[in-house]
Amino acid sequence: MRFGETYIPGSAPEETSSAAAQIAGVLAENRELRAQVEQLRAERKALLDIQQSVVGLLGAKSPDRIVHDLRNVINERDLLKTLVDEM
């Protein structure tokens, strides 16, 4: 058995080494996933802050209404363009 290897009773040194490598790999993947979760949480918070700012600036009752109202505005703009072009 080498320095740093974990002894697992009833297993051969190769198996112990392989198990330790697997555990190290899983731990590394776990650290990476935790970092990704933290990054996604930060991005989500930033997007929610922007959403709240837009809701406040537009005086909307809810974020869901913004998309609905924006569609209405775009449709009215298109209608106005069509009317102006026909004049």
Image (cartoon, rainbow, N blue to C red):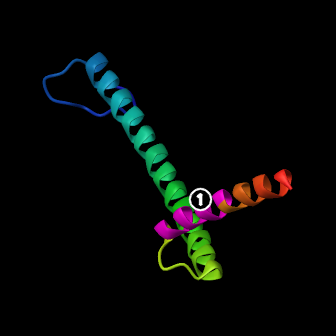
- SS at circle 1: helix
Residue at image position (59%, 63%) is 72
Residue at image position (58%, 73%) is 49
Image position, residue 81 (x, y; %): 79, 56
The stretch of residues the image draws in magenta is 64-75
In the displayed structure image, the side of residue 39 where residue 20 appears, left or right: left
Dominant secondary structure, magenta: helix
Residue kind at label 1, given as amino acid type: Arg
Residue 70 in the magenta stretch? The answer is: yes
Q: Looking at the image, which is closer to me, 34 or 1?
A: 34
Image position, residue 53 (x, y; %): 62, 77
Image position, residue 2 (x, y; %): 38, 27
Image position, residue 19 (x, y; %): 29, 27
Return the residue at label 1: 71
Residue at image position (67%, 59%) is 74
Q: Looking at the image, which is closer to me, 35 or 87?
A: 87
Toward which corner of the image does residue 24 lie, by quadrant?
Answer: top left
> The N terminus lies in which quarter of the figure?
top left
Residue at image position (34%, 34%) is 23
Q: Residue furthest left?
A: 10
